[in-house]
Image (cartoon, grey):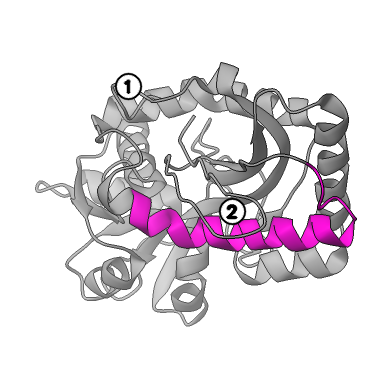
Amino acid sequence: MYLYERLPFNTDRDFQPISLHWELPNVLVVPAAHNPSRTAAEFVEWAKARRQGVSYGSPGIGTTAHLSGSLFAARTGIDGTHVPFRGAAQIIPAMLSGDLNFAIDNLASYVPVIQEGRARGLAVTSAERHPALPDVPTMAEAGIRDFQVQSWCAFGFPAGVPAPIVERASALVRQVSSEPATQERFLRTGARAISSTPDGVWERARRERPLWQEMVRISGARLEEPGAGLVRRACASICTAMSRWLNSLFVDHALLRIPWRNWGVVESGRLYRSNHPLPWQLEGAVRRF
């Protein structure tokens, strides 16, 4: 709601959460061949000593990498310049070549180059260390306070779905998310499978809103009305994957005849809408709180 001047819906009125689904932290990463820093504190000292400042990359304006980089620069007092790319596939080569000084981007994309020693992970933005990078401290451990920034996703219905259906769906998501096979599968992608009650979704969203608002303000990021252009096309595959997962989950639990038509998918990213020809029409809503 902070990236956009207006939204075609009211988040508090128009959605009924089901459960949290996954979360994915960012990682502060620097190129090993072009930066001597081995801790976040050393990097801040190194960056402040550069008269020309430092540059950080992101997959685009308004992404968590952009907002994280802006917040990090503001919190630490370094002179940081945002350089938008199309994605990590372009950011990583630019950083490894020395053209870019750092990134605070989603952990999954950077684990291979960190493990290979071509880049150094200096801190993760989650509350706890991540299993994929157990030797990399959290931002809090690295001395950067109040810097818990994670992309996350939740399942949701349109408002008005009867409470027994909401509770049943929430219980099923919690059951599947707790299974070891599910946990392992998500960890392979760098994410954590999580779950919650419906109220737990609202609690997290409202708790994090002040931080997202601060990050957007500091960055100066503004985006067009959600659902248009590249955002809509880029998110279609996520809608498809999630709808298939939900479809298989609820069919397995004999809930196929539940008479809803619209699915909502709420993430700490952006809003998009996409119809998909499954037993139910899918409406995915992915937005930043």
The N terminus is located in which quarter?
top left
**To which residue does mark 2 refer?**
137
Distance, label 2 to label 1, CA atoms, is 38 Å
Q: Is residue 268 left or right of residue 157?
A: left
Q: Main secondary structure of the magenta part?
A: helix
Of residue 198 and residue 104, the one placed in the foreground of this image is 198
Of residue 18 and residue 190, the one placed in the foreground of this image is 18
Q: Residue at x 60, y 45 (%)?
A: 153
Q: Residue furthest top?
A: 13
Which stretch is magenta?
A: 232-258
Mark 1 packing: few (<14 Cα in 10 Å), some, or many (20+)?
few
Q: Residue at x 83, y 26 (%)?
A: 163
Tell me the amino acid under the disc marked 2: Pro
Residue 61 in picture, x, y percent from top left:
26, 44
Q: Is residue 289 left or right of residue 161?
A: left
Comparing labels 2 and 1, the label whose residue is closer to the camera = 1
Quarter holding residue 223: top left
Contact (CB < 8 A) between labels 2 and 1? no
SS category of the residue bearing label 1:
loop
Residue 240 in picture, x, y percent from top left:
55, 61
Residue 6: give its label.
1
Residue 244 in picture, x, y percent from top left:
65, 62
Q: Is residue 236 magenta?
A: yes
Q: Is residue 22 magenta?
A: no
Q: Residue at x 20, y 70 (%)?
A: 98
Q: Between disc 2 and disc 1, whose residue precedes?
A: 1
Quarter holding residue 162: top right
